[in-house]
Image: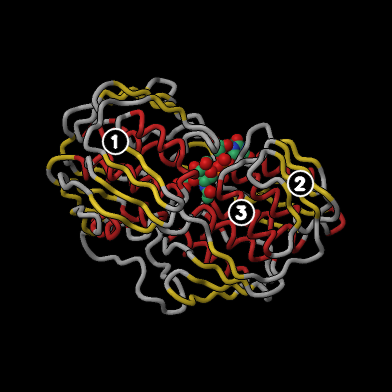
Amino acid sequence: MNVLDRLDTTLRVVGGARLEGSVEVQGAKNAALPIMAAALLARGKVTLHRVPRITDVSVMWSLLEALGARLSLQDRNTITIDAANVNKARAPYTLVRKLAASFDLCGPLLGRFGRAEVPLPGGCVLGTRATDLHEAAFRALDAEVSVAHGYLIANARGGRLRGGEIEFRMPSVGATKNAMLAAVTADGDTIIHNAAMEPEVVDLANFLVAMGAKIEGQGGDTLRVTGVAELRGVEYEIIPDRIATGTLLIAGAITRGDVTVKKTRPDDVLALQLALGECGVKVTTGDDWVRVQADTVKGGTDVVTAPHPGFATDLQPQLLSFLCTAPGVSVVEESIFNARFSYVNELVRMGADVRVAMDNNTALVKGVAQLSGAPVEAPDIRAGAALVLAGLGASGETEIIGLEYIDRGYERLEETLSSLGAQVQRASGIVPFSEPTGTFETSVYPSV
Ligand code: EPU
């Protein structure tokens, strides 16, 4: 990517506007991606509603096509996947390198072909992306697992996986998804202990059950899977995106506004509701909406990121941006990833008072009266969103380079924020999606 390309992917925010109004939230990225991968296991066609139009979905789309699946766009957020002709068990590195979630393909490929070859995710800007728990899960299901030439290679002994007992040392989201995906068509029963309880893991389980899988215990820390011979095609709606929900609520809070996020699930953002409440933001909820009114922010708060239902690591940067503008001192501790504060330097360039401890896991935030707009660079999806929020709460103009990261996870964030009264503009050039043409545009992916 050359310098001019970078200029094309800039978002300009003019701060100071108080956000007001209500918006519907997009479908969940981290549910849509594994569910698309899971469609590889279906005998019939899968139709998915509320699929977010984001570049990560485009990459998964291309990956499934590369394996031999046929995908089509039914309307703006509805896609169909027909995996009948999938004939490859090896995912191409050129696409996988753009999407850590490509590793979700291991389980379905292993279940379908008794073999999976998927490039290792390697490192990313958030920290290490280890795969030991995925490997242990496949071994527990009687697969031989090795690493060669940058690929994880798993082979079911005798060509078919067998149920087993899996005990995770920590509740990894990705490894729980892969264990379930591999176990649903294995011979016999599987028990997964210390499973991740994130809503997206539950959504994947519910989707698999809709396809005919037998899974019990969704939403708890122990999952019981009874293997079935085959899974059928289904029509399914993806859950609302809790991270996009939280991002929009924090946009309301940082602009001292009044924002309602609709068609969401309030319980999925409970920890954020509590954190904002502690700062003096008024939070009210209904069956499918959450409203923040932030006229009187009294102070900061302390949060530690943790597996669900704890405070989501994917909302850590956005909350920290808000805390930079809340009176008093706040402490933010990151316990999921080992390098998730790299964006803090950009906030400091906007006048924030934040110190990250030497261990890189704790940030001390002292609220300042006002941030000042500056050119900044987004290092990843959520930190990119956090910089947009900081720009909304700052005086003057903030230019965020690296909009392509934000486009990986947020469906037209600038349009959503503008509808609430923000002054946010895509600076020029690249439009990630034109109207439905039967395929998702794939030319603007960042390489991560
Ligand atoms: N880990 C291991 N061994 C493993 C797997 C994970 O040590 O075998 C470690 C990782 O190195 C990491 C931690 O466990 O430090 C958490 O990893 P986890 O497997 O739970 O996360 P993930 O599946 O890689 C998903 C989301 C992330 C989100 C995390 C935590 C998707 C596609 N990604 O990642 O979302 O931060 O769970 O909730 O579902 C994002 O959307 O921006 C994003 C980064």
Q: Amino acid at mark 2?
A: Arg
Amino acid type of disc 1?
Phe
- The residue carrying mark 3 is 104
Q: CA distance from mark 1 to mark 3?
A: 33 Å
In the image, residue 191 sits, relative to residue 84, either above or below, namely above
Dot 1 falls on a residue whose secondary structure is: helix
* Quarter the N terminus occupies: bottom left
The mark lying in front, picked from 3 and 2, is: 2
1 or 2: tag closer to the N-terminus = 2
Q: Residues within 10 Å of mark 3 (few under 14, many from 20)?
A: many
How far across and how far down the image is residue 414, in percent?
Answer: 27, 57
Residue where numbered disc 2 is placed:
224
Position of 413 relative to 235 (above/below)? above
Callout 3 touching callout 2 (CB < 8 Å): no
Q: From the viewer's perspective, is residue 395 above or below residue 432? A: above
For residue 351, which quarter of the picture?
top left
What residue sits right under mark 1 in the picture?
322
Looking at the picture, tell me which residue is in the foreground, 286 or 86: 286
Q: Residue at x 30, y 58 (%)?
A: 416
Q: Position of residue 167 (x, y in %)?
A: 74, 36
The alpha-carbon separation of the residues under discs 1 and 2 comes to 40 Å
Q: Nearer the viewer, mark 1 or mark 3?
A: 1
Q: Mark 3 or mark 1, which is nearer the start of the sequence?
A: 3
Q: Amino acid at mark 3?
A: Asp
Residue at the image point whose x is 79% and y is 48% from the top: 144
Residue at the limit of the structure toward the front, as seen here: 286
Depth order, front residue of 100/32: 32
Of marks 3 and 2, which one's residue comes earlier in the chain? 3
Residue neighbourhood size for the residue with mark 1, other residues' Cα within 10 Å, grouped as few (<14), some (14–19), many (≥20): many
| Label 2 neighbour load within 10 Å: few <14, some 14-19, many 20+ | some
